[in-house]
Amino acid sequence: MIITIDGPAGAGKSSIARRVANELGFEFLDTGAMYRAVTWGVMQRGIAWDDVESLVEFADAARLIWQDDRIYLDDQDISEEIRTPQVTSHIRYLADPPKIRERITAQQRRIATGRDIVTEGRDQGTEVFPDAHCKIFLTASPEERARRRQRQLAEKGQVITVEEILASQNQRDLEDRMRPVGRLRAASDAIVVQTDGMSPDEVRGEVLRLVRECV
Ligand code: C5P
């Protein structure tokens, strides 16, 4: 059984998907981490960002393993390395070309084969698992998402203004909405959950209620 949770950056998809998976005894897949891992690998090898052929070749050969909430590239655990701003700002070179998405999509389907899984990303309900049993599109206004992100960072001791977060988040949303294949959008049969003004517990409760109705 497959449950997809798509939505824009900072909508809280990962934490909600993880909690829903725990409650249902399903596995959880963070597909953003896969794009990040391949991006990190390209940076390590110094492949030029505009050398699409080499990028495709690398994405093809990359052995991505997602296990117990950790991501491995060719057996190396890079779960922390993939979260840097440098990785984030280069992901589009891997997420834009349809040929590379094809490879990563194939890996996502392979990971989900034979499993009960909650998978989160941008295109899970539209391109990767169009026949998923349950599709959620989790979203909130850009301002609300930026405020939440600022609070999270402040808890980790990182001081950054809401305006700065909003600027980079808007840029990422724009890139994610514009790509030719796998762009950020709700599937026509997805349930849209607009989370402005809801606490994390309320969002979790609502998503669980919706998911339980369709599983
Ligand atoms: O979810 P996260 O912020 O980690 O995703 C990082 C980036 O990876 C997104 O901004 C998007 O460009 C790309 N991505 C994608 N398709 C997915 C998941 C992530 O293109 N299914």
Image (spheres, grey):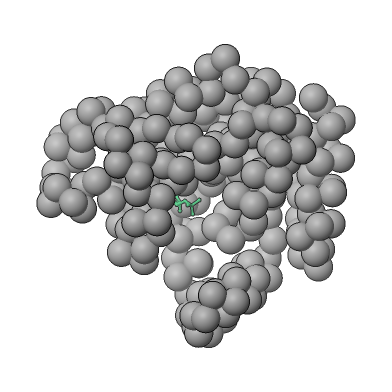
Q: Is residue 88 above or below residue 55?
A: below
| Residue for point 34% across, 28% down | 103
Q: In front: 174, or 196? A: 196
Q: In front: 112, or 142? A: 112
| Residue for point 18% across, 51% down | 44
Q: In the image, 91: left or right of 149?
A: left
> Which x, y percent locates residue 83?
41, 59
Q: In the image, 183: left or right of 62?
A: right
Q: Is residue 200 above or below residue 138?
A: below
Residue 149 falls in image quadrant? bottom right
| Residue for point 18% across, 31% down | 57
| Residue for point 44% across, 65% down | 171
- Look at the image and tell me whether residue 117 can be seen: yes
Q: Quadrant of the N terminus?
A: top right
Q: Quadrant of the C terminus?
A: top right
> Which x, y percent locates residue 29?
54, 37
Q: Is residue 60 above or below residue 80?
A: above
> Which x, y percent locates residue 183?
49, 43
